[in-house]
Amino acid sequence: MPAKNKNEEIIDLTHKYVANTYGRFPITLVRGKGIKVWDRAGREYLDFVTGLAVNSLGHCHPSVVSAIQKQAGQLLHVSNLYHIEPQARLAQALTKVSFADKVFFCNSGTEANEGAIKLARRYSFDQGYKNRYEIITMENSFHGRTYGGLSATAQTKFHNGFQPLLPGFKYVPFNDIKAVEKAVTSKTCAVLLEPVQGEGGVYPANKNYLKALKKLCQQKDLLLIFDEVQTGFGRTGKLFAYEHYEVKPDIITWAKALGGGMAIGAMGGSKQVMKSLVPGTHAATFGGNPLACSAALASLQVLNRKGFLEKSCAVGNYFESKLKELAQSQNAVNSVRGTGLMLALELNVPATSLVTDCMKKGFLINCVQQNTLRFLPPLTVSKKDINGLLKVLKELLGKLPS
Ligand SMILES: *Cc1c(COP(=O)(O)O)cnc(C)c1O
């Protein structure tokens, strides 16, 4: 019997021993540098997935790697019973670049949203509203897989078999201010949404909608919470998506790209709102640990470099215009959506097979909602890399039956 190749061995081990929660492609990625990743067989891919908007500086950015190496030799973890220097410095850096005055650290996006949900209820309670707990969220949203985040997520496909959900969520159509107005009751404490819906298919909020939402929240004394877990840290062409809208939320949640590849989540808020978090109200053992915070600090310093975001924004505009050109020439394309380097191509046919076909040609891309190709390249992606992908997409789309 021929010896199994190493890749097959890893696939077998995964099937046998890892919970089957992901549909995986049959490759094992072992190394990355910039936009490139390599599988066990040494095949090279250009990565337009980036661990789902995590590796925004590309793989193994030298500043992030060296910060991790340095911190790893010094101190990996200590309890939040003590002060932690990289955590304090990261919090300061985050408040400097955002509306937030204070930050709570955790380890993932869903956990950041749990914090936001708890904070919204607690703040409302502290304001003297004794029976306010409802949070309005948007259809087609995605806020994570733990019970708070899952209950906030208004897509039934994620709920099936997991009921009862956390009570107190009301779902309304996205980009529909009238629907929010109608849903507000004396029990409402907050509105939670993604400024650009990611998993739902890359749908940006309208500017007038977010402005009206802010006004409504102010009038009714509700908290406005932006889930910027995916849109944060330059993904949409600005450091945070809310900057496009000139609308500041009261609470913001972050994760994905925050750590430059390390697992870290955070929730930021205004001074007024964050006053409700006092010792004993919320915690996370690993939250704000030295290693993750050092990586995030290094990553943020790169994003803050003069011209970095402007350049990535320009490349994003180029990518979008090229996708629009492609859409014009291809019958299979319904629409192009997105902003910055968070872009999508919606097809009028199932799009999943295109992901595999692109992979065979050396490009990693993602598909959401069955028919929508989502592109989340590193913010350092070049026009040449984009042109390479477009050439492959054009060829593959041209072969689709129309
Ligand atoms: C990915 C994502 C989450 C969940 O983040 P995890 O780190 O997987 O828990 C929450 N909200 C949005 C908008 C996301 O894109």
Image (tube, rainbow, N blue to C red):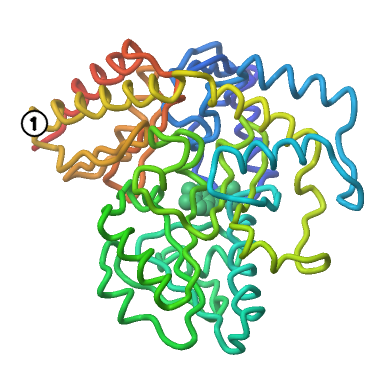
| The quarter of the displayed image where residue 84 is located | top right
59 left or right, relative to 371: right
Q: Quick one: 77 or 361, which is closer to the camera?
A: 77
Answer with left or right where residue 223 lies relative to residue 7.
left
Q: Residues within 10 Å of mark 1 (few under 14, many from 20)?
A: few
- From the image, tell me which residue sits under label 1: 328
Q: Residue at x 67, y 39 (%)?
A: 263
At 64% from the left edge and 47% from the top edge, which residue is drawn?
A: 265
Q: Position of residue 171 (x, y in %)?
A: 38, 73
Number of marks in picture: 1
Q: Is residue 198 left or right of residue 189?
A: left
Q: Amino acid at mark 1?
A: Gln
Q: Position of residue 246 (x, y in %)?
A: 37, 48
Q: Residue at x 41, y 86 (%)?
A: 185
Which part of the image, by quadrant, shows the C terminus?
top left
Image position of 114 (left or right of 204): right
